[in-house]
Image: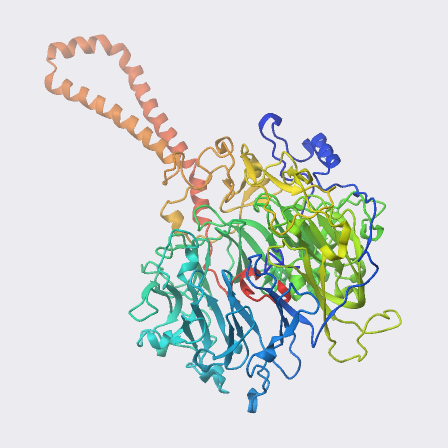
């Protein structure tokens, strides 16, 4: 299973009353106000169905009665790589196996025929000295750790080992050449990035050789150098030395070209962004913490000439879309623009401030979160379009239980790039892995696991610190604007999957699913919820019904949604491992190794209605199922390890209990397996559908895309191109807005977040953003029509009507009142000048005689007019006084990270996520 969120496991849930946005001739309704539409959709199969989809017949394969033969390896496979993304090259598959003691690295196996049996070769033996033990303490530094290639030129592959050599192929792995690592440093610590448009250019951050000494932890000279290769690893230039003393050491780095993966080029190809120490006496070893002596710089000539300092004190950065996120320690004496920054009373130990730039790092604005706590670490999770990111922040809460709980808050991005709104509290996490991610292919849909607020009142939580028993799964269909529970099915295939109470109140019984933290770091490695952009609407997961997520093996089932998470079906009475192929038209499923050995697989051609069996010659413990990266193929690779042979499992082959079992893979090529049952799809086999229901709106648009009909048992083929997705705009409703900056959702209402610090945020100080009095703002990426009937005072993006920045319209009203008063004063002044300078005594006498009866009333009227006008002015201005006070409070103390600055798993583990995720 190739994951899409956190490394290709989608990380990347609700009562069905979610985001049903109706427009056009049908009007628009939401949730339970659309019962007839929901019934019609279910009846037509467009909803995925709450009733169990009936299966007419299932078959056993192969049809000739034979069984699939395994491929044997010296150890289990931990990663599979296909060469590039092009269909012409995906026949080349590389497998990296687990290290076998005393080796640090594993073997690399190569197939030139889609992984089919008989095509695998241990190419580590072709790499000179890759398996040769070394003398002394480095004797175990053998084998291969990782491999790297450019997607557009996958014929060139660099294999990195733990020792002092790389191996390079330029012909898809037919031949290999040994080269030195950059600076002849240990490859175990290297970080490598290939240029996005120059396939021969490589940057490698390496630990200096002095770090191998015993006192490395206290040696300030133990630091990182950045090396450049322009010939795919054959030769290397030390950029620290290249700087002629202007750079002492590197810390973080990236290619500037990653900011312009389009026709518009932000920087020359030679541009490198980095955080550096400029002087050797400022270096503090490998663990400097957040350090004001480090700076964010860029060079356009590989540091041959003086670099440009983009931000003093810049420590770590990430590039997302055209944005740069930069972390600075809070004791930095200046802002990124160089202006002095007061630090007295604000700097905290290990604290950090996050800034963002939307103009290729030319200017930065402080990222503001509406919280009053310091922060221990945070993740960035990209939005569907890759243009922005959610922040998942691990706060240093004051309450004892929440302080210890493994959780963080999710903050949604805004249009202005700096003001983040609170999307979800108490998001569950394990270490740096957060249970939050995209449902790929369906814009605005995300899933997350949340700790229940009941944890705060349950005494057992404090005594045992057993927070995992309070996990609940949520889903959003509007980009984090609101979250709902996952609706449990109304009918079940497998009775054991219904764990809701049969009697009494079952309203608390929902569906809960394991997330990325379970897969990467949880007990037993439970598979996570998983989606793929090339299989839109399909989501599979392991979990249970009940009040909370369970971890006991006998509580788990495997679940499937075909409408992006709106409705669910149980498809296996155990914890499965799964993968999609044929552009989402083919699903494959098997029991995960935590369920014990298996000698059969299941596959479905009708999105989970019928599951056919494929029989294996010997049983294995299955760890993962993989397909080429685009999920277009009908050839899968199932990998695991030999299982222990017992009377209960006579087809297992491992006989030495306690020893390392052999690695096993099965290559599942559906075309020869199905034989005469194989059929290519035709035009009549496709339908148009809108997720999650025919008339619903996602992110302000009704989306219509093509998929194969559920009743058509045929194959799309690798060359299939999905018909272009179309969309129509929807009228704005409350579904299209989220709580404004400084507000949080309480059921259907947005309320001010209480207890915020009164520090100010620069974007509000400069009056570049207007906080709407409606308490709402438009969700980032939403394109609905006619927002003005929901948000009347701004455009939902922090601008005044007409697109102008500046103060709230209230200031315009008070200014108008002032002008009226000024006009009256001018008229009266002119009359006064005429009266005293130009009017004759005779004229004055006649006028006084005429208006005398009116003077008393006129005097009273004038006094009332002035007093009334002043009261009106006070009412207009003071009416917003509470709002202004709120703006002062809606800021937070500087971000503090005792953990780290990182992207979601997808970025942290690239280019080599373990287990393919």
Q: Give the left or right position of residue 701, taking residue 272 as reference.
A: right
Residue drawn at x 79%, y 53% is 612
Identify the image quadrant of the C terminus: bottom right
Identify the image quadrant of the N terminus: bottom right
- Residue toward you, 59 or 319: 59
Q: Is residue 824 visible?
A: yes
What residue occupies the far right of the structure in this picture? Answer: 647
Q: Give the left or right position of residue 456, taking residue 181 as reference.
A: right
Q: Position of residue 475 (x, y in %)?
A: 64, 48
Relative to 756, residue 54 above or below: above
Q: Is residue 355 visible?
A: no
Tell me where residue 746 sits by quadrant. Answer: top right
Residue drawn at x 60%, y 25% is 25
Tell me where residue 415 sits by quadrant. Answer: top left
Relative to 229, residue 808 above or below: above
Relative to 238, residue 535 above or below: above
């Amino acid at each position: 299973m190739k994951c899409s969120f956190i490394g290709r496991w989608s990380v990347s849930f609700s009562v069905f009353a979610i985001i049903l946005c109706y427009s056009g001739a049908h009007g628009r309704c939401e949730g339970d106000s659309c019962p007839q539409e929901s019934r019609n959709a279910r009846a037509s199969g467009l909803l995925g169905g709450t009733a169990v989809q009936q299966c007419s017949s299932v078959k056993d394969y192969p049809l000739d009665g034979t069984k699939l033969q395994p491929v044997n390896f010296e150890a289990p496979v931990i990663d599979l790589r296909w060469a590039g993304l092009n269909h012409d090259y995906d026949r080349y598959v590389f497998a990296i196996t687990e290290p076998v003691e005393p080796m640090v690295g594993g073997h690399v196996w190569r197939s030139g025929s889609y992984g089919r049996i008989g095509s695998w070769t241990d190419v580590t033996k072709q790499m000179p000295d890759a398996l040769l033990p070394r003398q002394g303490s480095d004797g175990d530094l053998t084998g291969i750790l990782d491999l790297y290639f450019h997607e557009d030129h996958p014929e060139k592959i660099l294999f990195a080992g733990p020792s002092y050599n790389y191996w390079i192929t330029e012909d898809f792995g037919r031949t290999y050449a040994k080269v030195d690592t950059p600076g002849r440093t240990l490859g175990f610590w290297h970080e490598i990035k290939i240029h996005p448009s120059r396939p021969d250019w490589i940057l490698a951050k390496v630990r200096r050789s002095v770090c191998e000494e015993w006192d490395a932890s206290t040696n300030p000279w133990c630091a990182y150098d950045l090396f450049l290769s322009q010939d795919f690893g054959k030769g290397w230039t030390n950029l620290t030395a290249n700087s002629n003393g202007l750079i002492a050491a590197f810390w973080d780095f990236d290619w500037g070209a990653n900011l312009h993966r389009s026709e518009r080029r932000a920087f020359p190809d030679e541009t490198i962004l980095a955080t550096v120490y400029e002087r050797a006496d400022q270096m503090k070893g490998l663990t400097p913490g957040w350090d004001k002596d480090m700076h964010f710089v860029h060079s356009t000539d590989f540091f041959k000439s003086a670099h440009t300092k983009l931000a003093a004190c810049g420590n770590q950065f990430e590039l997302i879309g055209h944005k740069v996120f930069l972390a600075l320690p809070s004791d930095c004496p200046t802002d990124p623009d160089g202006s002095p920054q007061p630090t007295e009373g604000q700097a905290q130990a290990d604290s950090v401030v996050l800034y963002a730039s939307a103009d290729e790092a030319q200017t930065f604005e402080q990222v503001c979160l509406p919280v009053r706590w310091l922060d221990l670490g945070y993740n960035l999770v990209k939005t569907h379009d890759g243009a922005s990111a959610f922040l998942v922040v691990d706060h240093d809460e004051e309450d004892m239980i929440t302080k210890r709980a493994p959780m963080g808050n999710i903050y949604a991005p805004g249009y202005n790039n700096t003001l983040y709104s609170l999307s979800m509290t108490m998001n569950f996490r394990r270490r740096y892995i957060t249970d939050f991610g995209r449902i790929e292919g369906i814009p605005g849909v995300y899933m997350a696991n949340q700790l229940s607020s009941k944890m705060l009142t349950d005494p057992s939580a404090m005594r045992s610190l057993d927070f995992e028993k309070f996990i609940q799964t949520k889903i959003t269909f509007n980009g984090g604007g609101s979250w709902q529970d996952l609706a449990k099915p109304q009918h079940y295939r497998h009775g054991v999957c219904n764990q809701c109470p049969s009697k009494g109140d079952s309203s608390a019984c929902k569906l809960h699913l394991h997330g990325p933290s379970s897969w990467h770091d949880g007990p037993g490695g439970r598979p996570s919820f998983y989606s793929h952009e090339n299989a839109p609407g399909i989501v599979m997961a392991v979990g249970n019904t009940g009040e909370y997520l369970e971890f006991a093996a006998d509580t788990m089932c495997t679940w499937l949604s075909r409408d992006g998470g709106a409705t669910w079906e149980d498809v296996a009475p155990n914890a499965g491992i799964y993968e999609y192929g044929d552009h989402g038209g083919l699903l494959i499923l098997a029991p995960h190794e935590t369920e014990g050995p298996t000698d059969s697989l299941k596959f479905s051609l009708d999105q989970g209605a019928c599951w056919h069996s494929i029989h294996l010659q010997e049983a294995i413990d299955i760890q993962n199922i993989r397909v080429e990266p685009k999920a277009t193929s009908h050839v899968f690779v199932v990998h695991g390890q030999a299982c222990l042979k017992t009377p209960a499992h006579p087809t297992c082959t491992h006989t030495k209990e306690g020893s390392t079992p052999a690695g096993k893979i099965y290559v599942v090529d559906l075309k020869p397996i199905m034989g005469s049952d194989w059929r290519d799809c035709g035009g009549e086999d496709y339908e148009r559908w809108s997720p999650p229901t025919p008339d619903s709106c996602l992110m302000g648009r009704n989306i219509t895309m093509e998929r194969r009909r559920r009743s058509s048992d045929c194959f799309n083929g690798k060359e299939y191109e999905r018909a272009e997705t179309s969309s129509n705009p929807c009228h704005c409703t409350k579904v299209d807005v989220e709580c404004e900056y400084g507000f949080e959702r309480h059921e259907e209402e947005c309320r001010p977040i209480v207890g915020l610090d009164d520090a100010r945020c620069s974007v509000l100080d400069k009056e570049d953003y207007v906080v709407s009095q409606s308490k709402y703002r438009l969700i980032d990426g939403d394109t609905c029509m006619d927002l003005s009937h929901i948000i009347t005072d701004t455009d939902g993006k922090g601008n005044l009507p007409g697109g102008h920045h500046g103060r709230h319209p209230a200031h315009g009203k008070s200014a108008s009142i002032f002008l009226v008063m000024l006009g009256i004063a001018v008229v009266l002044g002119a009359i006064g000048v005429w009266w005293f300078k130009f009017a004759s005594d005779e004229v004055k006498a006649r006028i006084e005689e005429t208006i005398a009866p009116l003077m008393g009333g006129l005097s009273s009227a004038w006094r009332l007019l002035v007093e009334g006008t002043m009261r009106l002015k006070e009412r207009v201005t003071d009416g917003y006084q509470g709002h202004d006070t709120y703006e002062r409070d809606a800021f937070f103390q500087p971000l503090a990270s005792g953990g780290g600055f990182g992207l979601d798993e997808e970025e942290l583990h690239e280019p080599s996520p373990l287990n393919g995720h």
